[in-house]
Image: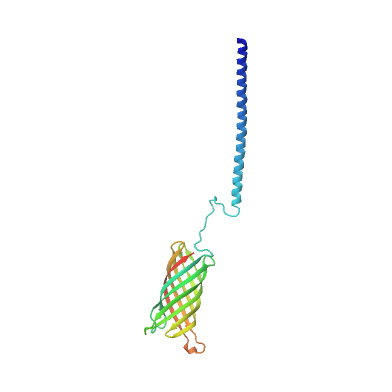
Amino acid sequence: MKSKLRIIVLAFFALFVFSANFFSQDNSEHSQAEDSQNSANSEQSEKDKDKDKDNSNEDGPDVYDDDYEYVYLQNAPGDQYINIRVMPNFPLNFDDKLIVGGQITVSYNRFLTTWLAVGAELAFGYNPTIGSNILTYIPMTVGVTFLPAIKKFEFPITLNVGMAVENYLSNTYFPGFVLRCGAGCYYRINESWSAGLEGFFTYMPQWYFKEPEKNDYLNMASVSAGMKYHF
């Protein structure tokens, strides 16, 4: 009986050792296979990421490239702005008849390049006379603006041509030719606003083709304070 019990115990022990070794080896092989699969998946994931990164950067600069530098353009083609100016007008002739007057202008401009803009302008101006009468004029012009810039400072150089409605007492002259050129300096406060000063010269002749002896002209100098709204 004891001999049989000893044989059963030994057999059970041998079976236990064999089972332990079997399951240990199986788990080890399964773990190795799992590690290999995870490693393969990781390598494939890295390859997919690199492929996606290459595809995303085919049409543009690499955002991870330290050599790439983003350039901010203060003015770009298609940008627009509205300019409002107020200014005194100093007559350069008619000194014995005209007194210093004033003018307000509103213009719309659109950039064709980073430094060239075109637009249109509407203005209203007046100059009193020594006889307490008033000469008024409403210029309507189109123009071009050359706009070099240094950091936040802009230096507009403008040329406008057009026509004006001119009135003195009960006499109205239309269309009157208008030529104006000017230059100035503006400071860009932020993306939407800038402010500055400009100086202008204005030439407004009156031509009477049937009565040339009545031909005359007005020359004026102006200094404006202006605000620009950029959009």
Tell me, what colour scheme is on the image?
Answer: rainbow
Above or below: residue 99 compared with residue 153: below
Question: Which residue: 40% across, 80% down?
Answer: 127
Is residue 38 depicted above or below 218 in this figure?
above
- Location of residue 175 in the rendering, given as x and y in whole percent from the top left corner: 50, 82
Name the residue at 60% across, 43% down: 45
Q: Residue at x 61, y 34 (%)?
A: 34
Q: Find residue 2 and report its image quarter.
A: top right
Q: In the figure, residue 24 lies in which quadrant?
A: top right
Image coordinates of residue 31 in percent, x first then y, are 60, 32
Residue 123 x %, y %? 45, 75
Image coords of residue 186 (percent x, y): 44, 67
Tell how many labels.
0
The quadrant in which the N terminus is found is: top right
Near-viewer residue (48 or 19): 19
